[in-house]
Amino acid sequence: MTATPHQHPDAELPEAHRPRTGGSFDATAVTFAAMGLFDGLSADQREQALLPWTNPDRTHWNFLPESGRPGVPLGDLDRRQEVLAHRLIAESMSTAAYARVVQVMSNEHVLRELNQSLFGHVAATLRDARGYFLVFFGQPQPDTTWGWRLVGHHLSINITVVDGDLVNATPFLLGAEPARFGPFRILGEEEDAAFVLLDSLTASQQQRTIIHSRPPADFVTRTVATVGEVEYPAYHGVGRRDAMITDEDRKALAYFRAHPRGFRAGDLSPAQRKDFDELLALFVERARPGLVGFEMDRIAAAGGVEDLHFAWAGGTSIEQPHYFRIQGPVTLVEFDNAEDNANHVHSVWRDPSNDFGADLLIQHLLDHDHTGGREDAGD
């Protein structure tokens, strides 16, 4: 069934859908931006862009440069449609995060030139600043449950709206290769903040914080749809067998949900705690302001920031391969810069209990006599 377009998002909002609370305001802005883009697509593009809410691909957030993904490639959009797509991206996150997203996509131009000189033209064709796929899961409408995703090389944005409220923006992945190029450092602010915190620790604090001398080749939790009770990193990065780690490395780096490793934030000095809070904010504040408050309330209810743990692996200077994570019951940050002589960054903000809005969707399904979406969408 072909979905029908909606009123343009610039039109006056109906009284029932005007902002009510911080979270609802965020959902309204995102929803109407999504409706504007959806309306701006051709009928064929709408078919291509829309999947049922229940489609299992919704939790597939792999960020490799792949062709043939579900959704509409940004490269297939005309200029007006591309503006509408960027409006949706910008409305779905903070201004700083949107700037990062644009930097990550634009960095593909740099990587293409570097790859062409190393591997030739064919390999370079994989690097495309518009080679990202945008897909809706369920048709965006006010007061309904739906989501959207933008995914491609070094980028995976996953937004979930439940009953008209913006409830989740994780997993939120940003990466960069090269991470440093000339005067530019994508994700340098996050990396610098982590080193400020690490360098502020005493020798005994660092001993508790540094869990292993070698970093993982990528995220310890990989790109699993749901973070398990225990997770181990892969033996090597995709296509990077030169960065193999051993079974002993994997055990030392492992994630244990019930037993976080590293240094507890509540045991930091006031000055160190300020550094920790600033580092955490760089990841949680990728979301829209109203959702940031919601996430911080969730952290508070799950033991507070003081119960989060900061762990480090690898070198202790920025030129050495390194990794850090922040872990709590409802918060997980992973930052890995272990490849290409510490010039290839992957960073992700996750919620182990609520990625893709999982726990709130369970309540939604209990409260409603349907499966949470328009199952005929895109048929």
Image (cartoon, rainbow, N blue to C red):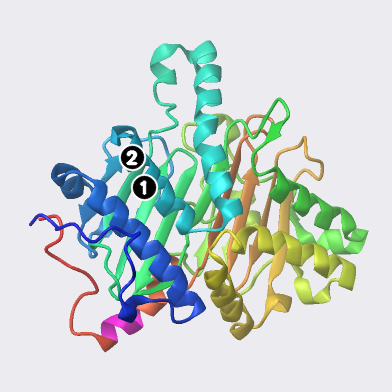
Kindly report the distance in space between the C-alpha atoms of the residues bearing marks 2 and 1: 6 Å
The amino acid sitting under disc 1 is Leu
Image position of 273 with respect to 247: above or below: below
Q: In the image, which disc is placed on residue 80? A: 2
Judged left or right of residue 16, residue 128 is right
Q: Are marks 2 and 1 in contact (CB under 8 Å)?
A: yes
Q: Which residue appears at 39% of the width and 51% of the height? A: 61
- The picture places residue 144, in percent across and down from the top left corner, at 28, 73
Q: Quadrant of the C terminus?
A: bottom left
Question: In this orientation, does residue 20 appear?
Answer: yes
Q: In the image, which disc is placed on residue 84? A: 1
Kindly state the secondary structure of the residue where label 1 is placed. Answer: helix
Given residues 181 and 23, the one toward you in this image is 23
> Overall secondary structure of the magenta stretch?
helix
Question: In this orientation, does residue 236 appear?
Answer: no
Kindly state the secondary structure of the residue where label 2 is placed. Answer: helix
Image position of 241 with respect to 168: above or below: above
Magenta highlight on residue 364:
yes
- The picture places residue 97, in percent across and down from the top left corner, at 57, 52
Q: Tell me which segment is drawn in magenta.
A: 362-366
Given residues 102 and 240, the one toward you in this image is 102
